[in-house]
């Protein structure tokens, strides 16, 4: 613990001013031991974690593709109201929220940049899983994630340039990992295409794959969490400062809330509102950590490299609470027993009406 506190004290002045983390001055930074040790000692667990994540993500995306229909996907492209609302929410609400919260919490320049980069990232695959769990529109969810990831190739550098002026001495927009964005897009579209094909050709098989994908996701969550804890270790505790904790909690909450409010304003359906809500609050944290790694030297970014993972913890927790709220709300809206009796009575009266009223007049007249 004393060693950890000493490391925190050594990092306190490393990113206090732009001059201390300018790319030209990185050799004078005061964090060389922390990050280099972490980088070289954790490669084995990182590789194991990445391998499991890729395998699990591929299986889950195939199962999500099995819930989609080509006809509904075409509808979202020909009538892109939901997609347009989601794009505005993703690249309008989240970057502005990150920038405003950085000012509100009086963060330092490099801390503000780490938060801003997270806010400018597109939606991640977690939003697709959350949409399925909350009974959202899966067709819209995958279309939204695809569009936001494609638009990230142009909007991310533009947003980073606009919001980072005065905070960063270099060209932050040049650090956007275009290759990584294309790879993540392919990893989503290829499995989903397979799932859509299976759903169209073999729907019975598709139902089994959906269940298998959810089982794989639940079972694999335990080793994924264990490997993540082993990879990060005590280093994760370094960014547990009140401002960064507050930022990590408020950013996804504001994204979820304003995404739902914006989609309600444009009168999207209930399922589409849930989908836009999940897409807005969930960010691609893997892409964010890649940009942080590419933009800053390890001895400059220091413990702030873990900020995307802190954000992920809060978006997971808040996302699960939202799913629970949506499920409870849906159950409360279902017709109760009284309504069911009323419908049954109505059907009985309709049958009686057809039997009596439509009989010939002689059938219902008194017999002599």
Image (cartoon, grey):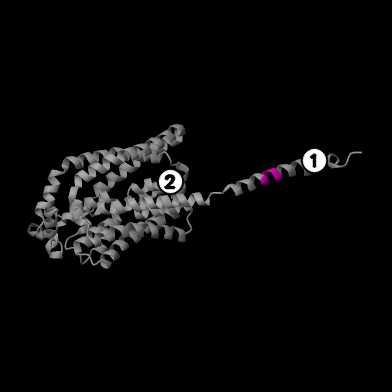
In the foreground, 362 or 146: 362
Query: Looking at the image, which residue is at 20% across and 52% down?
Result: 236
The residue segment tinted magenta is 345-349
Q: Residues within 10 Å of mark 2 (few under 14, many from 20)?
A: many
Q: In the current view of this chain or complex, which residue is farthest to the front?
A: 1
Tell me if I can see residue 80 in this picture: no
> How far from the left and from the top, in percent, is residue 284?
29, 51
Q: Is residue 336 left or right of residue 359?
A: left
Query: Looking at the image, which residue is at 35% across and 58% down?
Result: 253
- What residue is shown with label 1? 359
Q: Is residue 346 magenta?
A: yes
> How far from the left and from the top, in percent, is residue 313?
29, 51
- What residue is shown with label 2? 139
Decide: is 221 above or below 313.
Answer: above
Question: Mark 1 or mark 2, which is nearer to you?
Answer: 1
Point out which mark residue 253 bears.
Answer: none
Q: How many marks?
A: 2
* Element assignment for label 2: helix
Query: Looking at the image, which residue is at 28% across and 46% down?
Result: 182
Decide: is 163 above or below 202.
Answer: below
* Element assignment for label 1: loop
Tell me if I can see residue 233 in this picture: yes
Mark earlier in primary sequence (1, 2): 2
In the foreground, 170 or 351: 351
Q: Residues within 10 Å of mark 1 (few under 14, many from 20)?
A: few
């Amino acid at each position: 613990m004393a060693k950890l506190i000493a490391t925190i004290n050594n990092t306190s002045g490393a990113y206090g001013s732009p001059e201390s983390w300018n790319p030209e001055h990185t050799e004078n930074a005061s964090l060389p031991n922390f990050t280099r040790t972490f980088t070289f000692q954790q490669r084995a667990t990182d590789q194991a974690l990445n391998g499991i994540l890729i395998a699990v993500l591929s299986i889950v995306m195939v199962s999500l593709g099995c819930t989609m229909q080509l006809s509904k996907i075409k509808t979202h492209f020909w009538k892109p109201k939901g997609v347009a609302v989601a794009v505005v929410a993703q690249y309008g609400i989240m970057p502005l929220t990150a920038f405003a919260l950085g000012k509100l919490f009086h963060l330092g320049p490099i801390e503000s940049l780490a938060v801003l980069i997270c806010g400018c990232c597109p939606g991640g695959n977690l939003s697709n899983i959350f949409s399925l769990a909350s009974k959202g529109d899966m067709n819209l969810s995958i279309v939204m994630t695809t569009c936001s990831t494609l638009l990230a190739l142009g909007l991310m550098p533009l947003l980073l340039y606009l919001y980072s002026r005065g905070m960063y001495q270099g060209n932050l927009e040049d650090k956007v990992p275009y290759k990584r964005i294309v790879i993540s897009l392919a990893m989503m579209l290829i499995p989903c295409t397979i799932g859509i094909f299976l759903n169209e050709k073999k729907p019975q098989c598709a139902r089994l794959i959906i269940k298998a994908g959810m089982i794989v996701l639940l079972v694999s969550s335990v080793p994924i969490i264990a490997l993540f804890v082993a990879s990060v270790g005590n280093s994760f505790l370094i960014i547990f400062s009140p401002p960064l904790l507050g930022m990590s909690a408020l950013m996804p909450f504001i994204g979820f809330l304003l995404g739902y409010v914006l989609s309600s304003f444009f009168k999207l359906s209930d399922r589409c509102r849930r989908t836009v809500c999940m897409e807005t609050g969930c960010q691609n944290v893997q892409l964010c950590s890649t940009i942080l790694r590419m933009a800053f030297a390890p001895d400059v970014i220091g413990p702030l490299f873990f900020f995307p993972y802190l954000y992920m913890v809060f978006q997971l927790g808040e996302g699960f609470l939202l799913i629970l709220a949506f499920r409870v709300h849906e159950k409360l809206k279902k017709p109760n027993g009284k309504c069911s009796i009323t419908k049954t009575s109505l059907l009985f009266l309709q049958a009686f009406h057809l039997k009596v009223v439509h009989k010939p007049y002689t059938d219902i007249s008194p017999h002599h």
